[in-house]
Amino acid sequence: MLESKGHPNRLGIWGWLGGGRWGAERYLYTLHRLTGLGLLAYFLLHIIVTSSRALGQARWTQAMGAVSGPLFKVGEYLVFLAFAFHAINGIRLGIIELGFGVGKPIEPVYPYRTSLDVQRPIAIGVLVLAAVLVVMGTLNFWVLE
């Protein structure tokens, strides 16, 4: 049996899936995963609808008629919201992965304070930037049509 050095994972699989202590960064992680799955679902639907063009004009018209209702207008807006958050948060993750948001090394005791002290302002900046993008997009999507 392997012995854990330091702090054992008492939460098991749920600790990996659910996160145990939920901080702002963990919510960003979960939302990033959900928006990624949503964008993947949209991408697959987009491929299916677009590929109907190869089956002839009648199939194309039928497919476009199926995705032109008000429900799909709301769906397109949700895709925009997911894209806005996912893109900006992806930039944050890239910055952190390159080591700019890690902080000075200290004894590794959870929660890693130096990382949180550096990453929290980056996370807040990401949320503010995403909110500005969402407001601009919402105005363009619903008001300025």
Image: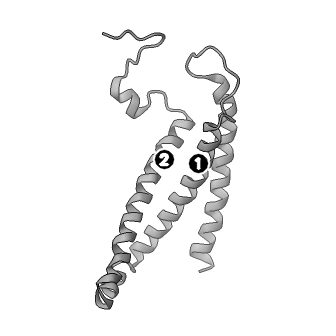
* Nearest to N terminus: mark 1 or mark 2: 2
As measured in the structure, the alpha-carbon distance from the residue carrying label 1 to the one carrying label 2 is 10 Å
Residue pointed to by mark 1: 89
Percent coordinates x, y for residue 40 in the rendering: 41, 58
As drawn, the residue found furthest toward the front would be 54
Q: Is residue 100 left or right of residue 53?
A: right
Q: Residue at x 53, y 64 (%)?
A: 80
Task: Kindly indicate the quadrant of the structure image that contains residue 67.
Answer: bottom left
> Considering the image in quadrants, where does the N terminus appear?
top left
Marker disc for residue 103: none
Q: Residue at x 48, y 63 (%)?
A: 78
Taking 5 as reference, is 24 above or below it?
Answer: below
Closer to the camera in the image, 74 or 3: 3
Residue pointed to by mark 2: 31
Q: Check disc 2: other Cα within 10 Å, few if <14, some if 14-19, many if 20+.
A: some
**Colour convention of the picture:** one colour
Taking 55 as reference, is 90 above or below it?
Answer: above
The mark tally for this picture is: 2
Taking 27 as reference, is 116 above or below it?
Answer: above
